[in-house]
Amino acid sequence: MAVASEGATIICNHCDRAVPSSNIDLHSAHCFRNLEKCKVCGDMVPKKYAKEHYSDTHAPVACSLCSETMEREILAVHKGENCPQRIVTCEFCEFPLPAIDLAEHQEVCGNRTELCHLCNKYIRLRERYNHEISCTGVPDNTVSSSRDARAAERGQGPQRRQPNEFSRKRLIFTIALTGIAVLLGSLFFGRKTEDNQVVH
């Protein structure tokens, strides 16, 4: 037992606490018999609860999201910041998904376009923030949708059939087919009723 700076107290060799010198023998007997120093944190723990202290405080735990094993102290940080299965939201569409899938999702989602109602241009979602800062708000009437641009590029190719011509032919075909079906149906059902009347 080490003697403290004051003669009235002594430092216990087992728990490193200052104990009045008159009680050191009684304290030492109790301390050695009932307490144990935790090898991880150094706290004095009752011997009968030492295993419980270790399992509740220091035992490795598995993340409920990704099953990775780690020390209990870093579990909360892992789940909040590092776990690949933690749920995060896409900055473009605010869709919740696992962090491991975020980069691939945002690569596709950020390439979608939306019309800027100030300048009438289609802007990629990933470029929307910078565009909003630099947008002059002057409509650019020369800008057209990507669908119109592709149609203009195909202008040299064979002409497409006009929608009205296609609809008219389809309508005539549908009417003719319906008429034939009604005619066949009336002939077929007409014969059955005649056959049924002859039997009775």
Image (cartoon, grey):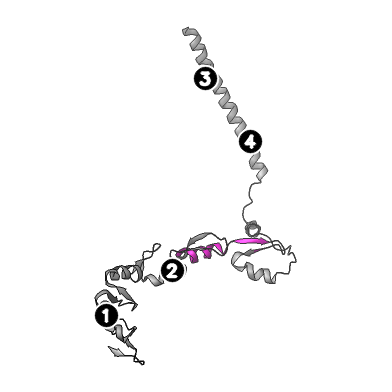
Q: In the visual, does 158 lie left or right of 20?
A: right
Q: Amino acid at mark 1?
A: Leu
Name the residue nearer the viewer: 90 or 184: 90
Q: Give the residue at x 55% y 62%.
A: 109
Q: Are marks 4 and 1 in contact (CB under 8 Å)?
A: no
Q: Earlier in the sequence, mark 2 or mark 4?
A: 2
Q: CA distance from mark 2 to mark 4?
A: 66 Å
| Observer able to see residue 59 | no
Residue 66 placement (x, y as % from top left): 39, 64
Question: Which element is circle 1 on?
Answer: helix
* Image quarter of residue 165: top right
The reply to whether residue 103 is in sight is yes
| Mark 1 vs mark 3, CA separation in Å | 114 Å
> From the viewer's perspective, is residue 96 above or below residue 131?
above
Query: Where does residue 107 sit, x and y in percent of width and height?
Result: 52, 65
> Residue 83, how many percent across, how many down?
43, 67
Secondary element at image label 4: helix
Circle 3 sits on which residue? 188
Find the magenta span and give its range: 100-122
Answer with mark 2 or mark 3, whichever residue precedes in sequence: 2
Label 4 vs 1, first from the N-terminus? 1
Residue neighbourhood size for the residue with mark 4, other residues' Cα within 10 Å, grouped as few (<14), some (14–19), many (≥20): few
Report the disc number at residue 171: 4
Tell me the number on the disc at residue 76. 2
Residue 70 vs residue 134: left or right?
left
The reply to whether discs 3 and 4 touch (Cβ–Cβ < 8 Å) is no
The residue that disc 1 covers is: 26
Labels 2, 3: front one = 2
